[in-house]
Amino acid sequence: MSVTQIARTSPALLVVSPDNWRLAIAVGLLVSAPAVAALPPGTSFWVVGAMVALVAAAFVVNAWRRRYYGGLLVAPAIAVLFVMNIFPLLWSLGLSFFAYQSNLQSIRFVGLYNYTKVLTNEIAAPDNWNALVNTGMFVVLTVSAQMIVGFLLAMMFAKEFPLRRYLLILVLTPMMLSVVAAGVFFTYYYDPTFGILSYVVNSIAGGQFILMSSKAGAVAGIVFADAWMWSPFVMLLVLAGLVSVPKYLYEAAAIDRVSAWRRFWCITFPYIRGLLMLALLFRTIEAFKLADLVILLTKGGNDTMTISYQLIRIANEQNKTSEGAAISYVMLFMVIVLTNLYLYLANRRNRRVET
Amino acid sequence: MTAGVSFRALAGRRGRRGVAEAGWGRTAAAALVSLVYFLPVLFIIFTAIKPQELALSVPPTISPTSLFGLIPDQFVFPPTLENFSSVFSRVMTTGSAPEPTGFDLYFFNSIVIATVSVLLALVLGTLAAYGFSRYPLKGNDTYLFIILTTRMLPAIVVIIPVILMFRAAGLSGSYLGIILLYTAFNLAFTIWMMKSFFDELSSDVEDAARIDGSSETKVFLKICLPQVVAGLAATFVFGLILTWNEFLFALLLTSTDTRTVPVAMNQAVSSGGRGTDWTLLAAIETLFLIPVFLVTFFLQNHLLRGVTFGTVKR
């Protein structure tokens, strides 16, 4: 009993013990700061890395001794995410307050100038706003198309029937294509001279059919290609929910003669709600990043510019790194608001069902 | 172990989870929909066995056989396997001997990088998801949301800090660097996906096993993991597909030795200034499709069978 009592309290700051994470942080900071200042970046990176590992090890030992299993299980994933994703994200957040171009050496603090420029500058801002509006349109169109098509496909495959697995893999294949190859082939399908679509329309309706000649056509072409590729993603998630519904619930419903509609809402839907939410969340996030299909199919022509493509132009082709970072943080803000709205609505529904 | 056996017996009485049966009528309907859905892919595969000069023919050639006279001759092309061999070695400059293109190495790289990083993300992500689900931390939802935000920004924003960081650490162009980056890239989805599967499990069985004296490790390995096999399979497939086809990071962070197929495909197809080499692109894409296709096909049973033994939810 006394052993667990001792293990429950953290050691004091200056006690040298493997679970003293406070000391580990202090040592880490004391070693890292001069190392970063004095050593060349190649060496100091590894010194800082070793210190981070030391702190992490102290946390692990601490969590193990005090039975914080949650922290222990989560730590390795968080560590990888921190080094590879969160740290670069914070770095680029920092860059958005500086005037920095990746092809120039100079770097200068400018505060919120980049944000005011991308949002209110008379020359630069209208294009960005326009791209944002287009992105919103693409998000609504592609995500709703994917959710509907994916859901219907899942309902079709929800029952066991002969050859089911062979037919299912056919539907899953579009998702496996590389976006580059799929996009390039869609330019071929939509091509006014050689393409299959134009050939079919021309031979039925006559005349010259060019899908990409109007904004509506160009948007339809991009939405179709994107929905075609990613509906199977929604389908697979919904299907994973559908197969986990216990059979006896349906049997009970059949005995009680529950209508098909009620059976769906009261039995099936609660089981797939979480996965539908996940599909909606991840497809919305991906739709905000829509760029490669637009680059391949229209190059932003016909007013199909999206904010991600605009970002690639500014950050990569014009080398305006910090302006690009500012745009992406404006974008991140919007995605965060939207996803929080989703999660809020989902949780509210959850609570209502449970009470 | 005894706990596992007794619950399996218990589950047998309660009936399995699963799907209802439908007959050949459903097969016919599903076949029609699936084939139409598959057509654009089928066209790419057919382009891979087309003679190069017919790639842009008008009218488009759409089939290697006339299906016993069903398809008019003008739409039929003679099949060839030449495109596949030119993926691995072809004549680079007119008049010289065929040279190896290095695609065997690029395929090897793609397989190693995708497999290792997806498996690593699956292990770390499943552990983390279990932690988030069963031992909630203070501010659990905040952590989860921060993890989700890492997927929200376009890759192009993160790429410059990552390039600088990799250059400083000497990871640029190495397997380790790109594998760790892809692991992080897959973690967000893995954690969210696996957490939603763990959340669905009933805790009755776990609590009963704990009372029977099972350790926490045993509860996780013997009780929880077997119930989320479908989730593991789905997450693996999604992760593999995304990593397999990732282009931007691979373009900027791999060297000639660690280059992956999407990057090499882009270069092979657009080099030479003669416009797109359609048949070559189709051949590379067809070969590149085979591994993920096979993996998905063999994991499909796990994807669709759902949980292995049915415990009652909540």
Image: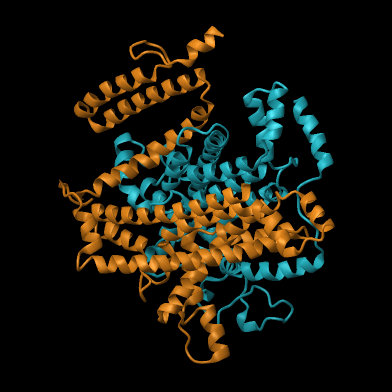
Chain colours: A orange, B cyan
Q: Residue at x 46, y 49 (%)?
A: B260
Residue B97 image offset from top left, x and y in percent:
45, 59
Which quadrant of the figure has residue B228?
top right
Instruction: Examine the rendered structure and indicate whether residue A204 appears above or below residue B253.
Output: below
Q: Would residue B190 be found to the left or right of residue A267 on screen?
A: left
Residue at the farthest top position: A2
Which residue reaches farthest front?
Answer: A355
In front of the other: A141 or A342: A342
* The C terminus of chain B lies in quadrant: top right
Question: Is residue A318 or residue A287 the one in the foreground?
Answer: A287
- Foreground residue, A270 or A247? A270
Q: In the rendered image, which quarter is residue B94 located in?
A: bottom left
Q: Quadrant of the N terminus of chain B?
A: top right
Q: Nearer the viewer, residue A327 or B246?
A: A327
The percent position of residue A29, horizontal first and vertical second, equals 28, 24
Asked whether residue B103 is in view, the answer is no
Residue, x 48% and y 74% (percent of image)? A220
Q: Position of residue B108 (x, y in %)?
A: 52, 45
From this view, report whether residue A167 is shown above or below residue A24.
Answer: below
Residue visible at 32% across and 52% down? Answer: A329
Residue beneath the point at 32% across and 59% down:
A312
Q: Is residue B7 visible?
A: yes
Q: Say whether residue B196 is left or right of residue B311.
A: left
| Residue B33, placed above or below residue B17 | below
